[in-house]
Image: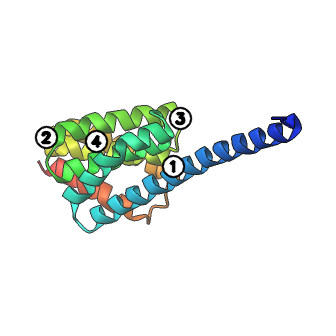
Amino acid sequence: LIYDWGIMRKHILFLTLLVISFNLSSRTIDSIFVHSKFDEAIALQEKFQSKKALTILNEILPDIKSSFGLNSRVTAQAYYHLASLQLDLAQYEEAKMLLNEAISIFKLLNATSLEIGNTYMLLGIYYDYMAEYDKALAYYDLTKKIYLKLLPLTDYKFGYLYNNIGICIYF
């Protein structure tokens, strides 16, 4: 048999490009799937279906870490939402651990202060649930400083914040 190495080279190049493009599209499909499941979990949380949402987020967390990285914004957001769900379900220690992890990642990434402020708010809620009102107030104060810089005073988040501060002061 006589081989035309020019044609063989073209076929090898074509197959290599095909494999590379398949891998890239495979990653894209994985990313779309993860985002889709993530959005589904958030929608379930908004419908007060915390157990289902928690199950979905726990299932896709390994995919999030592998697709986006351990110190990615998406991973930090996943930790934030997992913690929020765990607070809803009275899984307090797990929530605290995830919130601290989310803050570490957000700070590492120089994330927007609003993401950090929202995470501080959840930490305040955690300490509120633990009846550690001084710590809760400290986190609410950190949240307030961030919100005052970034949000108009008419933003709904101030309502939640001042309500939580009031509850802490009452107790």
Q: Which mark is residue 130?
A: 2
Q: Position of residue 64 (x, y in %)?
A: 42, 43
Q: CA distance from mark 1 to mark 2?
A: 29 Å
Nearest to N terminus: mark 1 or mark 2: 2
Q: Is residue 18 above or below residue 52?
A: above
Q: CA distance from mark 3 to mark 4?
A: 19 Å
Residue drawn at 20 percent across, 40 percent down: 127
Mark 4 or 1: the one toward you: 4
- Report the colour scheme: rainbow
Q: Which mark is residue 149?
A: 1
Q: Tag 3: residue type? A: Leu
Q: Position of residue 47 (x, y in %)?
A: 26, 69
Mark 3 or 4: the one toward you: 3
Instruction: List the residue tagged with mark 4.
Output: 123
SS state under label 2: loop
Dot 4 surroundings within 10 Å: few (below 14), some, or many (20 or more)?
many
Q: Position of residue 11 (x, y in %)?
A: 77, 43
Q: Tag 2: residue type? A: Met
Task: Indicate the quadrant where residue 12 lies.
Answer: top right
| Residue nearest the viewer, comparing 171 with 160 | 160
Q: CA distance from mark 4 to mark 2?
A: 11 Å
Instruction: List the residue tagged with mark 3.
Output: 109
SS state under label 3: loop
Q: CA distance from mark 3 to mark 2?
A: 29 Å
Q: Tag 1: residue type? A: Lys
